[in-house]
């Protein structure tokens, strides 16, 4: 009755265990007896409905329920009205967990009993394995196995045969035979013992010898007594090398080619981004490649969302049946060729690795040397590019070389570290009265000493430095004399690379600074819109050109500059030499801005037209029309006109100079230079635009104006420029025009509409309820079902309990009845015996 | 400046004393004396004006200066009457001085004087000297004084007329001004352009609109219980307007006056004229002037065509000839676009005519300032939307190659310019305009046309600087930089400055 005595809580566990063990036994596919299966036949099969109760085993489930009751309710019933119980605390079972539990309980017992040693940490208990101490096992002694002994002790076959079954007729009598056998056994035993002893002895011997040997062997490896030879430098170095930290795993050192390749990839990416911006694509909107199924046949359908610009690369045929080159492909090809150019450039650069790091910040450490090399490189570049203007670039080269020569000498006495000046005045003090190249070096060192890489707060400092530099440039260029202007340009020349470095550090904030400057200049210009802005305005346009990506379709800095320049060129009537020169400076900048993007600014072209117009001598009554700001009549209309050149003077070809930007008096020399520059600019502008559609109309007014220009009086080079310009103009003007045709649009696909499915719940058997009511109804239904189930369970439980009771009652009754029967039978037997006795007594009496 | 503040304090003191104590009457003399001195030495007069305005407002509203004349009684010679007479004289002096100070060089002073005069006029209207206060009275003589002073022959009083405009919302002021005006016209005005301009400014400042006639706001409004016996009939005003204008038409027109006459005519006079047809000749003559005058005349002609059924055969040719490159440098380009928009709004115009306009505008857009280029582009877009047959210009049947543009820019007659055979290459060229807003506007031809026309009114108001401000205020965080480090002030590649300049 062990189970009865278990705790009540343990009951269900026991049941579960039993169940699982039962399952274990009936693991195989149990064959069902068809007579035991009850099938609930369904009239209709309903889609989507799971039927759980299509078949059942009533017998099995009843038995299951009965067993469950027997194990739970039955046990409880048995324990009913019992006051005490017997708890078996033995830990039974053979599995590992049981063993573990036994071990723990044993330990606990020891622990509690040994009160004294409870906190004795040194008391290491002896661990055993299968009754042996671990220490014993570790010695690997050959345990004296009892095998042979046991074998010996077993009586051998012959003996048993002889002894037990009487041998078989041999003459030797039984006793002597047994004695002999015993003696034999003893002898064997002694022999074995002797052998064993011998082996043992030998082993011990060996062990002892090994110990001796071991000491010898130890001498070879670690001998402290031996005097080490003193470590010489080689040893020390070697040991140092051994113990030196090996260094963390880093990227493989890149070869020059790899670096060049990386740089090329970077530039390529930047160039692609620039081209995208130039075309006015939104840089943030990534091109979404719409998913195309593998078996999409591309039936030339236009799917609403696609833009024309994002035409996929597909083979397509135009309306006229000719193969069209898709737009995207063309563009890519263009890019490709561009990149090809770049590649060539890079290859040249790649020849010596140092220059390659140009843009990298790391190279800043040895910036000065690099720069020198680079300036050489740059020169060679420009030479290649501007092969037409060889003279200039060589001149430049000479200039730069001279600078380089002097630079090192100059910078020798400058301190290497500079604090970032806190105020603009301090900054001015720092750079004032220094030669331009020294100023450049000072700025470079200020940047290096306060680079944001050293400290995050330096970002602010750099911004401040940038604003100071802008202010400084502004001050340099405000109302300078001729000499001052030259130095100012020299300073700007030195500062420009540093401005570039600075703006790379914080492009957004510094660009905002630049915008602020432009805004302020525009405000000043608005106050006095009839006068040309000073040089301190114009120079910023050049800075913008050097720092910002001017080819962008829309740029936060460049676009306002374009508008500003356009305003200046279209509103201010040039009256003096400086006005004309400033205008030409702006026009040059416009050309520079639009070089990549091939765009045009009408006011710049109009300005050039105006300059040509001014160079045409006109008779007083004659009116040659020109668009404002130039005047068609009056003195202003022939500011640059030349009657006749003085014979004795020569006018060699020269560029416009910085002096032109500040002086007011118009000389013949200036007249020629201005016209020559204008003519060259006109040529360049239209050369740049000649690919564009509709530029014909831009060229026409120039051609008309050229008709009137009397070139005979001018030196030869002017005539040459004019001829070149005229050729280009003619080419552009006579360019054939193709009538505009809308881009072929794909036929629009009829839109497929998803069928609109509406859920109509219109069950007549059950009226539609509100959500809350529906919920409630569900709940009530559930409760009802649960209650029903519970009642049934209770009923069954009662039934079970009653059946137990009934059984015990029946058992009691049967016992009683048996007892009564026995008593009756005994009594009747007794009575029979009594009667028999009486009868004998009567008989006796009769006798 | 110290003097000015001292003067103000002194004036204040004198005023308070005078108003509180009738015995200190000489203070008034003193104030007027100071005023006279300031006027003569052309010193600031505002404070004097204000003080006197206050004093006389008080005196007038309390009827202190009113001398009641009993019909049959002889004039009594009591001290009060004498005092009143004395006050009246001072009042006249003050008026003279105020009118005098209209000539002040300082604009705020003269404006203050005008305001003071108008205020005193209104107070006097409410508390008249001669009539019983129960009847409506307007001091016409005072108004006449003011008007004469305003229509100065030596000085242009534009600022004063600006100020006078504030009073033009009162029907009585308008009415009486118009009544006075014919009397003030001079046939010889053309000999004095200042007077002529002042006169036109005045007309400009007193528009007779329906609103004012209906509101009946009166400057000299008496209390509610007072009857207004004046009717302010429009017919009478109209008569005087016509009279005035017939006089003006006789002037000899020189350039600025001519322009002003046309503006005033268009904006103020035209609706009130009895026989606007008479203007036809004048307008036709003006049309031949071309430029802004021609444009204004064209607007007049348009009104006549629209409202008075005159026919003018060559109106489209005239309009066509207005579109010259110079137009972008005049103030009237917005008006021109507005007019052109109206003229070309009819969908029944021949397509070659509209095409000529479109083509001409497109040519102009190539040289126009950016903001005008944007207007033109949207305008062209609207034209194409209105006249679907013009789609030929941007969507030809076949892309035929032409060696030259078939459109003849020099042709004066739009229908002969052969524009319909052309294509709008100019707009394609503008897609490469350096200024992004223009380039974006030019993209419309390569996109499907919208269903509705572009709203020109938003772009018509754009000033030159707006386009700059718009671009500046465009907030995007794209600050793309050059990625090639320049080593000098020149770019590493493609620097143009270095090709053309030797800066150091």
Image (cartoon, coloured by chain):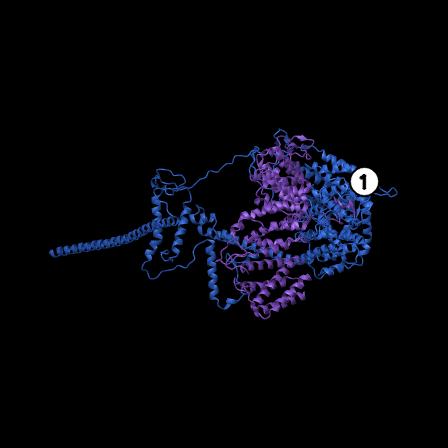
Chain colours: A blue, B purple
Can residue A227 be seen here? The reply is: no
Q: Nearer the viewer, residue A89 or B459?
A: B459
Q: On screen, B428 above or below B484?
A: above
Q: Position of residue A330 (x, y in %)?
A: 66, 36
Q: On screen, A425 above or below B252?
A: below
Q: Chain of mark 1?
A: A
Q: Nearer the viewer, residue B486 or B140?
A: B140
Give the farthest residue toward the top: A321
Q: On screen, B316 above or below B211?
A: above
The structure residue drawn at horizontal position 55% and vertical position 48%, both measured from the top left corner, is B236
Q: Position of residue A558 (x, y in %)?
A: 68, 47
Q: Nearer the viewer, residue B219 or B501?
A: B219
Q: Secondary structure at mark 1?
A: helix
A416 left or right, relative to A279: right
A182 left or right, relative to A208: left
Q: Position of residue B223 (x, y in %)?
A: 50, 59
What residue does disc 1 label? A718
Can residue B415 be seen here? The reply is: yes
Q: Nearer the viewer, residue B299 or A253?
A: B299
The quadrant in which residue A32 appears is: top left
Give the farthest residue toward the left: A846
Q: On screen, B32 above or below B245?
A: below
Q: Position of residue A532 (x, y in %)?
A: 73, 49
B140 left or right, relative to A721: left
């Amino acid at each position: 009755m062990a189970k009865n005595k278990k705790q009540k809580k343990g009951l269900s566990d026991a049941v579960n265990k039993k169940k699982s063990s039962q399952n274990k036994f009936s693991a195989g596919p149990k064959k069902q007896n068809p007579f035991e299966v009850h099938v609930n036949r369904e009239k209709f099969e309903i889609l989507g409905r799971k039927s759980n109760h299509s078949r059942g085993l009533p017998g099995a489930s009843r038995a299951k329920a009965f067993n469950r009751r027997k194990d739970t309710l039955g046990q409880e019933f048995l324990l009913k009205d019992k006051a005490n119980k017997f708890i078996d605390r033995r830990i039974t079972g053979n599995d590992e967990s049981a063993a573990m539990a036994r071990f723990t309980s044993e330990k606990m017992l020891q622990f509690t009993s040994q009160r004294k040693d409870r906190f004795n940490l040194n008391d290491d208990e002896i661990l055993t394995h299968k009754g042996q101490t671990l220490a014993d096992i570790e010695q690997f002694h050959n345990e004296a196995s009892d095998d042979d002994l046991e074998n010996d002790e077993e009586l051998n076959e012959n003996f048993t045969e002889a002894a037990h079954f009487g041998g078989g007729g041999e003459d030797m009598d039984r006793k002597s035979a047994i004695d002999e056998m015993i003696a034999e056994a003893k002898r064997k035993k002694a022999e074995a013992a002797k052998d064993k002893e011998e082996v043992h002895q030998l082993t011990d011997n060996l062990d002892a010898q090994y110990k001796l040997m071991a000491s010898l062997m130890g001498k070879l490896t670690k001998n402290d007594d031996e005097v080490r030879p003193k470590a010489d430098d080689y040893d020390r170095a070697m040991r140092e090398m051994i113990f030196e930290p090996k260094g963390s795993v880093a990227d493989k050192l890149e070869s020059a080619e790899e670096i060049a390749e990386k740089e090329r990839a970077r530039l390529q990416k930047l160039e692609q981004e620039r081209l995208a911006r130039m075309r006015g694509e939104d840089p943030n909107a990534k091109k979404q490649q719409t998913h195309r199924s593998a078996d999409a046949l591309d039936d030339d359908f236009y799917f609403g969302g696609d833009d024309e610009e994002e035409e996929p690369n597909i083979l397509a045929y135009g309306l006229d049946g000719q193969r069209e080159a898709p737009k995207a492909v063309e563009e890519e090809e263009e890019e490709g060729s561009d990149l090809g150019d770049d590649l060539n450039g890079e290859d040249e650069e790649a020849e010596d690795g140092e220059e390659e790091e140009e843009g990298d910040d790391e190279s800043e450490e040895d910036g000065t040397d690099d720069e020198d090399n680079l300036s050489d490189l740059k020169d060679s570049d420009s030479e290649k590019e501007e092969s037409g203007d060889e003279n200039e670039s060589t001149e430049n080269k000479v200039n730069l070389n001279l600078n380089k020569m002097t630079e090192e000498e100059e910078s020798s006495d400058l301190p290497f570290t500079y604090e970032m000046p806190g105020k603009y005045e301090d900054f001015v003090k720092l750079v004032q009265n220094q030669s331009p190249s020294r100023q450049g070096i000072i700025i470079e060192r200020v940047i290096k000493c306060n680079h944001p890489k050293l400290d995050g707060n330096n970002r602010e400092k750099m911004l401040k430095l940038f604003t100071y530099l802008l202010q400084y440039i502004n001050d340099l260029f405000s109302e300078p004399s001729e000499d001052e202007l030259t130095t100012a340009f020299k300073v700007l020349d030195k500062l420009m690379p540093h401005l570039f470095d600075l703006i790379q550090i914080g492009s957004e904030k510094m660009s905002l600074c630049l915008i602020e400057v432009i805004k302020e200049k525009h405000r000043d210009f608005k106050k006095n819109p009839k006068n040309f802005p000073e040089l301190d305005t114009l120079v910023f346009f050049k800075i913008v050109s050097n720092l910002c990506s001017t080819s962008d379709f829309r740029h936060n800095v460049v676009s306002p500059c374009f508008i500003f320049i356009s305003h200046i060129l279209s509103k201010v009537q040039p009256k003096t030499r400086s006005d004309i020169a400033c205008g030409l400076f702006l026009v040059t900048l416009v050309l520079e801005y639009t070089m990549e993007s091939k765009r045009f600014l009408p006011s710049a072209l109009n300005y050039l037209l105006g300059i040509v117009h001014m160079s045409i001598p006109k008779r007083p009554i004659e009116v040659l029309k020109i668009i404002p700001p130039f005047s068609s009549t009056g003195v202003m209309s022939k500011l640059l006109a030349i009657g006749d050149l003085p014979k004795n003077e020569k006018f060699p070809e020269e560029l416009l100079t910085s002096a032109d930007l500040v002086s007011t008096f118009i000389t013949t020399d200036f007249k020629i230079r201005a016209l020559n520059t204008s003519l060259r600019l006109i040529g360049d502008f239209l050369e740049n635009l000649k690919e564009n559609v509709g530029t014909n109309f831009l060229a026409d007014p120039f051609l008309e104006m050229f008709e009137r220009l009397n070139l005979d009086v001018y030196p030869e080079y002017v005539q040459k420029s004019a001829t070149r310009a005229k050729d280009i103009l003619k080419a552009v003007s006579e360019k054939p025009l193709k009538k505009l045709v809308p881009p072929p649009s794909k036929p629009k696909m009829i839109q497929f509409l998803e069928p609109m499915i509406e859920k109509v719940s219109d069950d007549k058997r059950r009226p539609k309820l509100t959500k809350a009511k529906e919920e409630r109804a569900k709940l009530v239904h559930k409760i009802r079902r649960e209650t029903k189930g519970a009642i049934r369970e209770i009923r069954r439980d009662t039934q079970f309990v009653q059946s137990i009771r009934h059984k015990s009652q029946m058992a009691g009754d049967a016992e009683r009845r048996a007892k009564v029967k026995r008593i009756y039978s005994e009594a009747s037997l007794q009575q029979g015996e009594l009667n028999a006795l009486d009868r004998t007594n009567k008989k006796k009496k009769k006798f | 400046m110290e003097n000015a503040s001292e003067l103000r304090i002194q004036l204040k003191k004198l005023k308070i004393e005078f108003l509180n104590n009738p015995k200190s009457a000489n203070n008034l003399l003193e104030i007027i004396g100071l005023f006279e001195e300031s006027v003569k030495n052309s010193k600031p007069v505002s404070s004097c004006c204000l003080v006197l305005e206050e004093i006389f407002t008080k005196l007038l509203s309390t009827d202190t200066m009113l001398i009641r004349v009993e019909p049959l009684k002889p004039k009594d010679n009591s001290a009060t009457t004498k005092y009143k007479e004395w006050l009246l004289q001072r009042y006249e002096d003050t008026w003279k001085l105020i009118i005098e100070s209209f000539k002040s060089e300082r604009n705020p002073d003269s404006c203050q004087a005008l305001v003071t005069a108008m205020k005193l006029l209104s107070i006097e209207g409410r508390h008249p000297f001669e009539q019983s206060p129960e009847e409506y009275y307007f001091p016409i003589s005072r108004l006449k004084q003011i008007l004469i002073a305003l229509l100065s022959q030596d000085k242009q009083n534009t600022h004063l007329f600006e100020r006078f405009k504030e009073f033009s919302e009162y029907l009585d002021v308008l009415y009486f001004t118009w009544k006075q005006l014919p009397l003030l016209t001079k046939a010889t005005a053309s000999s004095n352009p200042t007077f002529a301009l002042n006169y036109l400014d005045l007309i400009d400042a007193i528009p007779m609109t329906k609103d004012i006639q209906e509101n009946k706001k009166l400057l000299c409004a008496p209390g509610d219980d007072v009857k207004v016996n004046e009717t302010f009939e429009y017919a009478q005003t109209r008569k005087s307007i016509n009279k005035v204008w017939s006089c003006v038409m006789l002037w000899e027109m020189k350039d600025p006056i001519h322009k002003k006459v046309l503006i005033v005519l268009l904006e103020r006079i035209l609706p009130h004229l009895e026989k606007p047809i008479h203007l036809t000749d004048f307008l036709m003559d003006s049309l031949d002037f071309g430029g802004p005058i021609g444009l204004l005349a064209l607007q007049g002609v348009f009104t006549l065509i629209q409202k008075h059924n005159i026919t003018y055969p060559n109106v489209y040719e005239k309009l066509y000839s207005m579109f010259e490159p110079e137009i972008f440098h005049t103030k009237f380009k917005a008006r021109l676009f507005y007019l052109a928009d109206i003229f070309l709004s009819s969908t029944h115009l021949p397509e070659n005519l509209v095409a000529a306009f479109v083509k001409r505008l497109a040519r102009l857009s190539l040289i126009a300032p950016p903001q005008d280029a944007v207007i033109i582009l949207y305008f062209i877009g609207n034209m194409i939307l209105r006249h679907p047959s013009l789609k030929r210009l941007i969507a030809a049947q076949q892309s035929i190659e032409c060696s030259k543009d078939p459109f003849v820019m020099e042709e004066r007659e739009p229908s002969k310019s052969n524009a319909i055979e052309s294509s709008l290459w100019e707009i394609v060229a503008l897609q490469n305009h350096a200024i992004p807003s223009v380039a974006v506007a030019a993209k419309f031809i390569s996109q499907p046309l919208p269903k509705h026309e572009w709203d020109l009114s938003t772009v018509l108001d754009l000033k030159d600087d707006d386009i700059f401000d718009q671009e500046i205020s465009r907030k995007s965080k794209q600050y793309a930089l050059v990625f090639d480090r320049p080593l000098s002030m020149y770019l590493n590649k493609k620097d143009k400055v270095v090709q053309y300049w030797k800066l150091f």
